[in-house]
Image (cartoon, rainbow, N blue to C red):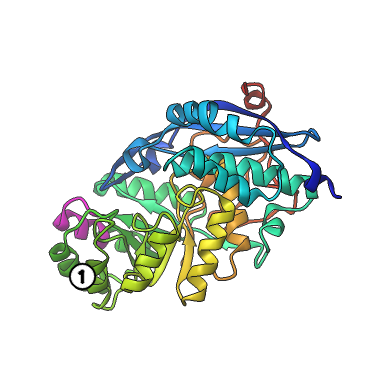
Amino acid sequence: MTAANTATVAAIQTARVSLRAAPELLVRGARGAHDRSDFLLVRVVTSDGVEGYGEVSATPIWSGEDGTSADHFIRTALAPALIGQPLTPVGALEDLMDKVLQGNPFTKAGVSIALWDAFARTLDVPLAVALGGPYRTEVPIKLSLSGSDEELERAYNAARAAGFGAFKVKVGLDLDTDLHRVRRARELAGDAFLGTDANGGWTRAEAIRAVPELKASGVAFLEQPLEPRDVRGANEVRQLGLPVIADESVFDVHDLLTVIEARAADTVSLYVGKSAGPGRAVRMGQLAAAHGIDVLIGSNGELGIGAAAQLQVAAALPRLSAYPSDIIGAHYYTEDVLAKPLDSDGRYVRLTGGPGLGVTLRDDLLREFR
């Protein structure tokens, strides 16, 4: 018997963390502005003394969860159910979390990341290997641009200074100003890769009107043009010839199958958080690939632990879109939670080869767990 087969979950601890976004990179979209992240870090300790770390990267305006709700549910529902359980298979622990807590996928994802990290560290392999990969060791990335003319230009200049060469523009607020913002972004970016993300903020009529102008601006895709449940409308928009990415429409396998059956997207944006954990994110990516649908890794403004989980999942996916993913990590914040940041130059983020998530938290944050 290996250590992974005999280990049990001995403790689950949490630490609250709050970081401000870099002001020049603040995201303003149809679901509001994201200027700070009040997240929760999670530590799982096994009976063999192995530690795994996770991150609940949840914002109330987007997911209906935050660090406070996550801390409550981990302490009152998830930890009592998980402590004493065998570490393997981790998928069974993900299923157990569903039995004791309805919804709250981002909260479950934080615990799941820590469980998978502990499992991979017990095996002494990168998480991508434990998840069935890696199929790649580097992933192309992009950064969101938003705001008015001056704000947009500041964001673009900051992004270029950080090394970014691919972007997406936040739209879905007001159609005329949205289209003006896209045209301005194209002027700034030249022939660089450029997509758009409406966060479900447009009506069908607005999206249909927008597509010709977006195509004229050389936009590569339109992400979540309509409200999440309007998959028939997304199919209609998709017929206009601009690739559509489904984001808010896809949280779980049922959502993914609904989008596939409606032919509502060319690509699906997977989150570790929306999927409720790394294992489920990879399984959803495999299901999408089986139906000929590309996936990319989307973002809820993850900190370093969450970004490391994004990277490991991206490496473990059998099929990943050529569109850049949103593994932005420390680029988005004024400081990092990691002792050493991910290997990212703004164009790509790369695996380092260490066990588990392959990263370490700062010492001051390690002292905060309780």
Q: Quarter holding the C terminus?
A: top right
Q: Nearer the viewer, residue 6 or 286?
A: 6
Q: Is residue 289 visible?
A: yes
Residue displayed at 17% across by 54% down? 177
Identify the residue under disc 1. Answer: 213
Q: Is residue 320 visible?
A: no
Q: Nearer the viewer, residue 324 or 48?
A: 48
Q: Nearer the viewer, residue 78 or 192?
A: 78
Q: Nearer the viewer, residue 48 or 314?
A: 48
Residue displayed at 24% across by 56% down? 227
Residue displayed at 64% across by 38% down? 53
Q: Is residue 43 magenta?
A: no
| Mark 1: secondary structure | helix
Q: Is residue 181 magenta?
A: yes
Could you tell whether 326 is left or right of 29 in the image?
Answer: right
Could you tell whether 132 is left or right of 167 in the image?
Answer: right
Amino acid type of disc 1?
A: Glu
The residue range painted magenta reads 172-183
- Outermost residue on the front side: it is 99
Q: Main secondary structure of the magenta part?
A: helix
